[in-house]
Amino acid sequence: MEDELIQIWQSSSDQERIKFEKSRLMIELESSLTRLHKWWKYLELVEGVSILICIPVFAFYVYFVPFILSKIASALTVIWLIYVIVRIVRIKKYKPSAFTESYLDYLHKTRKYLKVQMYLLKSSLYWYILPGIFFIFLFLVGAWEKPETHNVIILTAVLAICIGVITYYINKRRVRKEFEPRLKKIDELIAVMEE
């Protein structure tokens, strides 16, 4: 069986071999992208569920927390959480459909989709991490009036900063390890397809 396949391969024209090679590269790329798309769906799910839990909690705080600064922070947090989920979900419009396009169109659209996701992760410090830390600090400063809460406030602030730093470096690593190699592979494949 293996010898027959080798004979078929050797007797096929160069054009057929190139088509086979392109198909193999597309299958490898699609497999690699499937894992990344699953991770992105998981991210959307986790963020969506977290936000759906946090919005009612902070809306509750707006009305029932006695500190004015904490009320303002809670209201701003609700608005920011809505912004975060809209920003994450809005990326879906860039997701390519594999079934209705040529290989080249699919590759171009996939490259754009990955670049948008990568930009979202790269810029998360400004639209996700820093605003979140700022609203937590604002909320905590509002509760600073009660001396018995000082240790909890300091611990919460330190924890928020640590989570922000960890999130920043995880996003940076994911861009470097997951997105950049796939974009490089897509660019190479586009170059092969356009030849």
Image: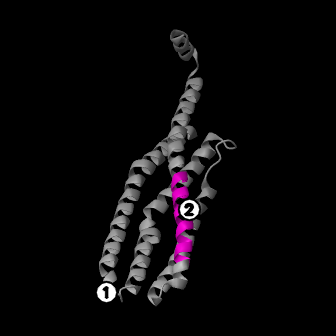
Residue nearest the observer in this picture, 41 or 150: 150
Q: Residue 17: x percent and y percent? A: 55, 24
Question: Can you tell which quarter of the image residue 91 is in?
Answer: bottom right
**179 sits to left or right of 8:** left
* Residue on which disc 2 sits: 48
Image position of 138 with respect to 133: above or below: below
Residue 51 included in the magenta stretch of the image: yes
User: Looking at the image, is mark 2 or mark 1 earlier in the sequence?
Assistant: 2
**In the image, which residues are magenta?**
41-59
Residue nearest the observer in this picture, 143 or 84: 143
- Residue at disc 1, secondary structure: helix
- Residue at disc 2, secondary structure: helix
Q: Residue 11: x percent and y percent? A: 56, 14
Marks 2 and 1 sit apart, C-alpha to C-alpha, by 35 Å
Q: Quadrant of the N terminus?
A: top right
Kindly identify the residue that appears in the image at 51 percent across and 80 percent down: 61
Kindly identify the residue that appears in the image at 44 percent across and 78 percent down: 135
The 10 Å Cα crowd at callout 2, few under 14, some 14 to 19, many 20 or more, is: some
Kindly identify the residue that appears in the image at 31 percent across and 86 percent down: 147
For badge 1, the amino acid type reads: Pro
For badge 2, the amino acid type reads: Gly
Question: Can you tell which quarter of the image residue 160 is in?
Answer: bottom left
Q: Residue 132: x percent and y percent? A: 44, 73
* Residue on which disc 1 sits: 147
